[in-house]
Structure formats: C-alpha cells, structure tokens
Image (cartoon, rainbow, N blue to C red):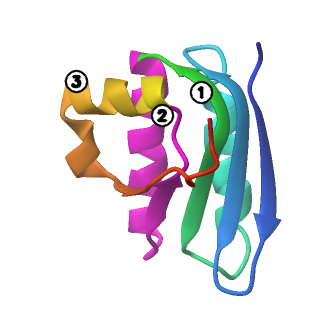
Amino acid sequence: MPLTARVTQSSDRCIVALDGELDICSAPCLLAAVDEALAGERRNLLVEATGLTFCDSHGLEALLEAQREVTDAGGTMELAHLHDRVRRLLDLTGLTRAFTIIPKRSKDP
C-alpha cells in the first residue's frame, strides 16, 4: 500500500497524517510533507501515525531525517498513535528514545 501524507495546520503546530507503508519507495513522500509543513510559519510538527501500517529500516531513517529537519528549523516533532508493530520496531531498534511518542488512544485498535 503506497504512503500518503496529508499536511494540515492547527493553531500551534503542523500535522502530517500518514496512511500506508513507510519504506524505501515512500520515504520521499514523508520528507516532502515535512518540507511542506516547514514552509509555513509553524515549526512544531505532529506526525499522526494512526494509518501507518508498516515501517522498515528505510522508513525509520526517513523519520530520523524528518526529525533532524524539524530540529534544525528550530521546532519539535512528535509521533502520535503508532500501531503496535511500528512501536515494536522502534523498541527493538532502541529508537523509542530518539522520538517523543504520544501513546495510542484507548479506543485505537
């Protein structure tokens, strides 16, 4: 399933909502969305990952690159509502410490 990244603005940050799979082919889609988000006035970014169903090592690298871009622009990046398998990948690779992660909502599957 290809990745889509939708950028929206809230009063205090940009939201990048991901749907699909984050891998070597779709990593540029995430980075383009981050660039679009940073082109506005807001520097704080929330990556809404409810629809992110898969992430491989290239996807992790893209998330780290996105975080570097946001940090370099003077902002912050949070990952929200990760599926269990994506959260497990972050746990296994030790990258949970690299990100600010907002837990899944209690009604999430």
Residue 76 versus residue 91 in the image, above or below: below
Question: How crowded is the residue under tag 2: few (<14 C-alpha within 10 Å), some, or many (20+)?
Answer: many
Question: How crowded is the residue under tag 3: few (<14 C-alpha within 10 Å), some, or many (20+)?
Answer: few
40 left or right of 81? right
Residue 66 versus residue 93 in the image, above or below: below
Q: How many marks?
A: 3
Q: What x and y, as percent, mark residue 9?
A: 78, 72
Q: Quadrant of the C terminus?
A: top right
Stretch in magenta: 57-83
Q: What x and y, as percent, mark residue 83?
A: 53, 33
Amino acid type at circle 1 is Ala
Disc 2 marks which residue? 62
Q: Identify the secondary structure beneath mark 1.
A: helix
Residue depth check, mark 3 versus mark 2: number of the one nearer the observer: 3
The residues bearing labels 3 and 2 have C-alpha atoms spaced at a distance of 17 Å
Residue 27 is marked as 1
In terms of sequence position, does the residue under pointer 3 or pointer 2 come before the other?
A: 2
Amino acid type at circle 3 is Leu
Q: Is residue 23 magenta?
A: no
5 left or right of 25? right
The residue lying at 45 percent from left, 54 percent from top is 103
Q: Identify the secondary structure beneath mark 3.
A: helix
Q: Is residue 75 magenta?
A: yes
Disc 3 marks which residue? 92
Q: Quadrant of the N terminus?
A: top right
Residue 64 versus residue 84 in the image, above or below: below
The quadrant holding residue 4 is: top right
Amino acid type at circle 2 is Ala
55 left or right of 38? left
Residue 42 is marked as none
- Seen from the viewer's position, the closer of residues 23 and 28 is 23
